[in-house]
Amino acid sequence: MSEHILSSKLYYGIWITLLILTGVTVGAATVDLGPFNTVVALVIASLKAVLVILFFMHVKYSSERMTKVVIVSAIFWLMLLLVLSLSDYGTRFAG
Amino acid sequence: MATATIPHEREHYLNKEYGIKSWLLTTDHKRIALLYLISITFFFFIGGFFALLIRLELLTPAGDLVQADTYNKLFTMHGQVMIFFFLIPSIPAVLGNFLVPMMIGAKDLAFPRINLLSWYVYIVAGILMMYAMVTGGVDTGWTFYTPLSTAFSNTRVVIAGLAIFVAGFSSILTGLNFVVTIHRMRAPGMTWSRLPLFIWSHYATSIIMLLGTPVVAITLVLVVLERALHLGIFDPTRGGDPLLFQHLFWFYSHPAVYIMILPSMGIVSEVVPCFARKRVFGYKFVAMASIGIAVLGFLVWAHHMFVAGISLYSALVFSMLSYLVAVPSAIKVFNWTATMYKGSITFSTPMLYAFGFIGLFTMGGLTGLFLACLGVDVHVTDTYFVIAHFHYIMVGGAVMGYMAGLHFWWPKISGRLYPEGWGRLAALIVFLGFNLTFFPQFVLGYLGMPRRYWDYSHSPEFQVLNVLSTAGSTILAVGYLLPMVYFIWSMRYGKLADANPWGASGLEWMTQSPPPTFNFDETPKVTWEAYDYENIPLPEEVTVER
Amino acid sequence: MNDSQAVVTAEHSPELRHHFADMEQQRDASTLGMWLFLATEIMFFGGMFCAYLIYRRWYFTEFAAGSRSLSIVLGAVNTAVLICSSLTVALGVRAAQTGKRKLLVILLILTLLFGLAFLGIKGVEWAAKFKEHHIPGASFHFEGTELHGKPIDARHIQIYFSLYFAMTGMHALHMIIGVGIFIWLTYHSWKGRFTPEYYTPVEIAGLYWHFVDIVWIYLFPLLYLIDLKK
């Protein structure tokens, strides 16, 4: 939903940021952070996704509450699938 | 604005246009509902046919009617057809499609062409399924467990999997249409708290359709890819986990049972206040319970896997959550009962089916609690106890609700009254036939008769109960055939119905029977609460003989 | 109906479908519909992410080894290609909002080119996998028996590659569908169908495209960057 017309400058800015973050992702992967490599990669990916959602998909400027409800619900439901499945896989062979 | 004195000369959605093209290319939600009605009835009889063959085989302990492999195909295809091609679409695609726009005061659903597309997608899926059935069938059980389905079965797993995948799309499109319609197309004054509970339950159903179906879709795709292209995601010889399939499968297939029951509950919430002449007790609780069922229903899936090899700790979690999900359903049963208390009850056909629903659903639901208990589940899982449990809910619950709804809204859909005497008789036959079919199965299961067994000659003492069950199934079949006959009869010879033969509340009863193509002559403006039965008079002409 | 559609008011727009009260209701409905569809897509890909999560925990060494056999360069380039395509899509929606038909067409064509470039590079990668016998099944073969001192089980590594092909394949299928949608969009934009009063198809097709981009944003680190330690 976009009554707002965003400036091209903003779009170019987001674009550059996304490209830079891609480079950061690759760079961070070459550094040994142990288990945090995965965390860092996913955090950066999520940051990129948030930028795309808020700006390219206009969610930041949308007055439409349902859009945000739908996005949050979908992510929450995916988490249900992942977390509850892990409740099995994470506790097998326990002890 | 029609001033004709003979109602059937008035223009309405059925006579507006004639010809096969006007039906196959319609975007009128009411016509699409009827297209679905014909298709799902067709599949109901196919699934029922498989059921009858199963019951015939089980008349004797020996496997002497069909071969073992054939029997596997029978119970598999009975399940697949009944679940994916009858129960899941039935109420939403028939009554939901017909009524959702009318109940909220809209001219059509938000996306009429997508609605028609959903029917064609369903038909394509149905054709694929039929092709699988006639070219060898499927024998994996409707649950498609790996590695049987991916590596060992020699039957049409790929085609059946694809058929169900395609059917899932139809489901998703229907759910999407409903959610957008309910959010965006309510008539002026139709606030959320004035919505009929039928709408609330279809909204909750749509949430499940949207968020659950994609997971089984991708799971079936992975099974097909593994089988056809030898990918190794569920293959134990390559380190795959068959339980992963079960987790992904049941993540949808448990909420799917709520797709099957919620719409039926919505029908009961409409029928009971009408034939008790009382508003629904605790409207907000019933509405919120629908949403609660939809959400909680996603948290319990591994109760289908208690003995499959999941960890004990996760089994405990899922067991507790499974007890919890019974609560909103129980709230609804209490509220329907409280609605009837001190009401003025009429034992019309829809009300008889609603009574049947409430009693049988309660039994099915309570036996679900037996199954949620880990210790008991170890004993009765994969026995006829489970089969009885889910048939009490699916048939005693969902199908009875569907029959209640078909009868209740038949005058609106067709402009005719069905013969009430025959309606009540058929309801009674269904109730008796159902209980005779499935109550013995609780006993059989508890005594230890396993499900999906073609031969029980190791325990010939099970035969008596099996014979009772089969006898019941033939009675049940008669009970289902009767409405087919008299509904069709009524389309030609039934008494003409006026706009509101039951004196029911709801916008759909404020327009003619059958409705005009765009539902209302003028967009309604709602200023009253739902179930305003104090202010709705009984119909002048008593349409239900006392 | 004359062809200067910019003059037509919202209520009488030929694009208004009769079951809607006005264009605003129609646009709101369409947008909500697309967001709901994207929610279903999140769950659709989500099933595969769930499988990935489970097996990566179980077979980390094999996942790392399999990941190393992919080309980081091609993966990163493809990521950049998709990011550029999201830019052109966003600018395209803006062009529609501001009534710049020619610019809109150019941006849509650029988007298509980026999309096709992505698919081409993906094809190159898959061809490489084919040559290296990394396609799961009877002819699978993986060179490499250990990584960082831990042994590689050649059977388990097939699971990594199964997920690799399933996930990138499903993603590529969505790209192909997106390309089809954008071809349709380009044609209708060229015909002048979209104006500041009615550009909903551009907007919602753009939402779809951005979603497909976001899926790749997650696929790239999860499939390509599991373990680049020396």
Image (cartoon, grey):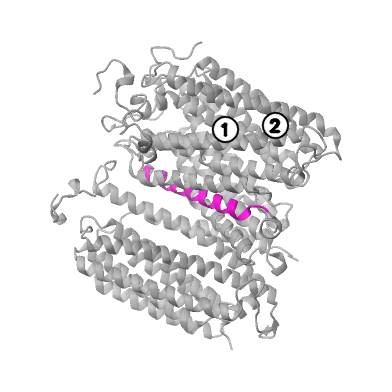
A51 vs C104, left or right, is right
Residue B399 disc label: 1
Question: Which one is in front, B410 or C210?
Answer: B410
SS at circle 2: helix
Which residue is farthest bottom? C230
Residue numbers of the magenta segment: B155-181
A47 vs B145, left or right, is left
Q: Which residue is mark 2?
A: B438
The disc, 2 or 1, on the residue closer to the chain's N-terminal end is 1
Displayed quadrant of residue A53? bottom left
SS at circle 1: helix
Residue at the spot x=26%, y=18% of the render? B4
B419 vs B248, left or right, is left
Percent from the top left, x then y, of residue B459? 85, 38
Depicted B380 relative to depicted B165: above or below: above
Percent from the top left, x then y, of residue B424? 56, 18
Q: Amino acid at mark 1?
A: Val
Q: Is residue B413 magenta?
A: no
Q: Is residue C111 visible?
A: yes
Question: Which one is in front, B374 or B107?
Answer: B107
C103 vs C28, left or right, is left
Displayed quadrant of residue C81? bottom left
Residue A80 disc label: none
Q: Is residue B207 visible?
A: no
Residue at the spot x=63%, y=21% of the render? B429
Q: CA distance from mark 2 to mark 1?
A: 14 Å
Displayed quadrant of residue B310? bottom right
Percent from the top left, x then y, of residue C163? 58, 69
Chain of the residue under the numbered disc 1 shown in the image:
B
Depicted B352 relative to depicted B373: above or below: above
Position of the N terminus of chain B, as image quadrant, is top left
Residue at the spot x=72%, y=26% of the render? B471
